[in-house]
Image: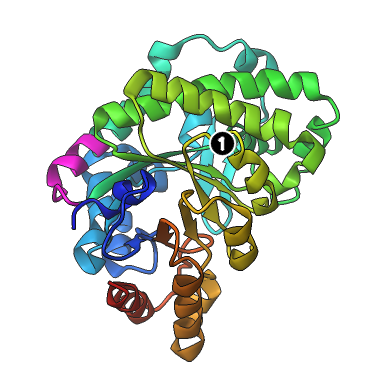
Amino acid sequence: MENRLSKTLIGQKTDRPALWMMRQAGRYLPEYRQTREQAGNFWTLCFTPDLASEVTLQPIRRFDYDAAIIFSDILVIPKALGQKVEFAPNHGPLLEPLDWQAITHFSDWTDFEQVLAPVYEAISQTKNSLAPSKDLIGFAGSPWTIATYMIDGGKGNEFSLSRHSLTTIDNLQSLLKILTQAISLHLINQVKAGATVLQIFDSWAALVPADLREDVLFKPLRQIIATVRQSVGDIPLIYFGRGISESYAKLAQKKLGIAFGVDQHSNLIALDQSLPQDIPLQGNLDPETLVEGGEKLERAVYHILEVAKNRPFIFNLGHGILPHTPIAHVDRVCELVRQAA
């Protein structure tokens, strides 16, 4: 059976659930650590096509996943828009204070694409190296999630300035408008370079109160989907709204033709019952359970497979693989999912 991921996303039956894992290329793999050391720093790894492609392919070679996801970062968007972004050791991203005037009046889209050209070259190289049966996932953050980093500078996870921006919605909407345009262009270019599936990460969606989600989260999402598909056709797309699965049923009524990513804190049974059976779901395995392994891991895998057996389903985590995850536990999950054939 070929292209399990893209076939699942368009509602076709496959012999077993499609399988890949968020952050499947990462520090838990010794080959990743070696390539990361060779690169010297994170941005060099992201923006050197040979290295980014190599890291993307490493988990495919080791685990034979059904899809590769291009090695990049959601913060390439603010970087390409001119905001300085650095990754401090043992800290994560640090962004310079946001120049609202400059960002909200940004218009140099040629330069934007030139900054991101190495990402597209990495996708092309990876596509040429992948077996035809493997999908290649391109991705971006959502406008809101990227905005939280741009506004707060990546300093911790409190996002106090971003939360405050929800009370001054006009300024925020100006930023979201530019980000919607930037993300759409970035996703389109990834498809043109060879991506066969797209995922939008809305990692900080839960910061937005339910009564503001339509304007802050879902209108920009619908605009991105429409713009991308108008340009490149009906590309399969996954929306991962971390912490807001209770909003999926309402969003599904818009008939966007997308799959929904499910974090580890969501009730998969309730979600399965609330959504039409033709809508694909992805995820829900707790990364900490993957670290723990043993009977607890096996029970969790069997539970997810049982709950989702009557709908299109992609086996994945509820968040990214943790750096201290034992490789043997990942192997075991792959084995269990493949036994579901």
State the residue at coordinates (23%, 51%). 3
Residue carrying label 1: 142
- Hey, what amino acid is under mark 1? Ser
The tally of labels here is 1
Magenta stretch encompasses residue 244: no
Q: Which residues are magenta?
A: 123-133
Magenta stretch encompasses residue 131: yes
State the residue at coordinates (45%, 89%). 294
> Which of the pair 130/12 is nearer the observer?
12
Q: Secondary structure at mark 1?
A: loop
Q: Locate residue 178: give its quadrant.
A: top right
State the residue at coordinates (21%, 35%). 124
Quadrant in which the C terminus is drawn: bottom left
Mark 1 Cα-neighbour bin, 10 Å: few <14, some 14–19, many ≥20 = many
List x then y, in percent, for residue 306.
47, 74
Image side of residue 134 versus residue 312, left or right: left
Predominant secondary structure, magenta span:
helix
Quadrant in which the N terminus is drawn: bottom left
List x then y, in percent, for residue 244.
67, 50
